[in-house]
Image: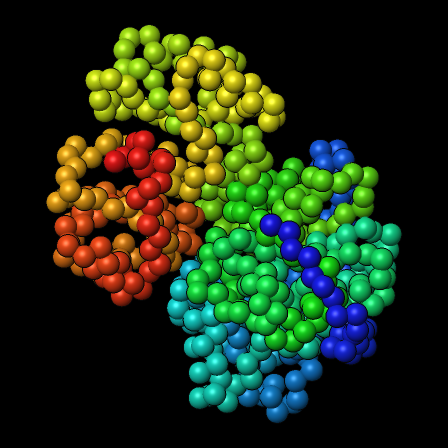
Amino acid sequence: MRLKIKKSGSYKFSKKYLDLIAKSKVYDVAEKTPISFAANLSGKLKNDIYLKREDMQPIFSFKIRGAYNKIVNLTTQQKQRGVIAASAGNHAQGVANACKKLKIPCYIVMPVTAPEIKVKSVKRFGSKVLLHGDSFDQAVKKAKQMAKEQKLEFIEAFDDPLTIAGQGTIGKEILDEQNNLDVIFVPVGGGGLLAGISAWVAQTKKDIKIYGVEVEDSACLVEAIKADKRVRLREVGLFADGVAVELIGKNNFDVIRECVDGVITVSIDELCAAVKDIFEDTRVLSEPAGALALAGLKKYASKISNKRLLAVSSGANVNFERLSYIVERSVVGENREKLFSIKIPEQPGSFLKLCKVFGRAQITEFNYRFSSKEDANVLVGIKTENENAFKKIKTMLTKSNFKFSDLTRNQISNDHLRHMVGGHKSTISEKDSERLFRCQFPDRPGALMGFLKNFGSKWNISLFHYRNLGAAFANVLIGIEDKSKSVSALEKHLKSLDYSFIEETDNKAYIDFLR
């Protein structure tokens, strides 16, 4: 989705940042990072693509700038008492690094889901770490409580003028090196980076457009723009942990409405494809949030040509365990793999006839299980070079009288079905009705046991698939036999639990392969 912002036309809130950015002291610890020309992407997208390499900072993230600029400006008394911060990882490293440099006592509260690589890095700087809560916002509540009790200075991750100004030095560096760009793309979590960069660029080089980029499952800025006020999300996705924020910052939102041209949202698949793109051009493994701006750039560039576009590559603190999922989903994100449910006659020679339709196309999945004497559904993954090749396969399937459904964007198919074994439920009756739900929860030792205990034993589980997605969170697909007379009884029970359930009983993938 691409959402334009109707800018206010004034710089009431943004004007002060020109001076704050110019006076920022970030270079005591931060590097002036280079801008890399992405040759592979430029050829593929038919635009000149550039990457602002914040993944090359000492802590492999831009967060070193804002954290240091805030802490170095504290009073002597504040520094002596010590500071505390909450972070999923990169802000924590920035704060810890600054405190080591300035010899200040430091405490960091990190969510239990924070990648281990980031937790270890914070500890190496000598900071005390407390793991608390499943999300950034839960960690913030705990950190603010500790700050009040222990009289520590709380260091905001994004919603502070000095933090914003520190991040804004990136905008100044960009224009110092490349002032003839057409559009700059910036990742959005709480909005500190976007506010800082846009405050400088919008007031210094007005003809350059600035777009924020959000993940679809964490789009707090999009919701705020729609409502014309800050909106707290009911839940946020955890895959791109660096931008998993419920509420856009107040100071940030004030600046964004004056300086930013629009916001683009991208899927997890498109995000994974952007991680691959950065690797192919730089040989750096970006973390998901670090590739977010590029994912939005690619979406924007698909409809234009011969423009000069820059994305901020904001971080490279990737959890190694997450790489397998990124690789798997990047193919779908590049639109190079399609997943089909194809109905074939249950008779000798059917597989051969179907395979002839695919010709020399690469088969990535071929899953089948006997379910009836008349016909069967086959789950087939097909990888080809372009969209025209897929259209030809669809045409051939139709000519060969194969009924099929495209499940490429079906979340149940991608997250669960292609990794499951088994087949249809053997018996279904009105009294024994199965309903299907999916939910997501943070993964940690004992998480599955905790989930099942909370679920209880009143309803029988008829299907269950649990899949860990790289040590950050897990997806669960659960079939429940609902024998209650009231349809709402089960729904009330699920709402009472500490998880968000989405019903998928009418999902095409479920109907074809599991029900």
Q: Relative to 236, is 144 above or below? A: below
**Residue nearest the observer in this picture, 147 or 436:** 436
The residue sitting at 69% across, 67% down in the picture is 256
**Residue nearest the observer in this picture, 178 or 118:** 178
Q: Seen in the image, is 364 located left or right of residue 494? A: right
Q: Seen in the image, is 417 located left or right of residue 33? A: left
**Residue nearest the observer in this picture, 61 or 264:** 264
The residue sitting at 82% across, 39% down in the picture is 306
The residue sitting at 36% across, 49% down in the picture is 475
Give the x, y percent position of residue 258. 74, 69
Give the x, y percent position of residue 280. 65, 37
Q: Relative to 514, is 472 above or below? A: below
**Residue nearest the observer in this picture, 348 or 42:** 348
Q: Seen in the image, is 172 located left or right of residue 401? A: right
Residue situated furthest bottom in the rendering: 77
The answer to whether residue 52 of the structure is visible from this angle is no
Residue situated furthest top in the rendering: 349
Q: How many numbered marks, from 0 up?
A: 0
Give residue 135's quadrant in the image. bottom left
Give the x, y percent position of residue 305. 78, 38
Give the x, y percent position of residue 355. 42, 13
Quadrant where the C terminus is found in the figure: top left
The residue sitting at 60% across, 88% down in the picture is 78
The answer to whether residue 307 of the structure is visible from this angle is yes
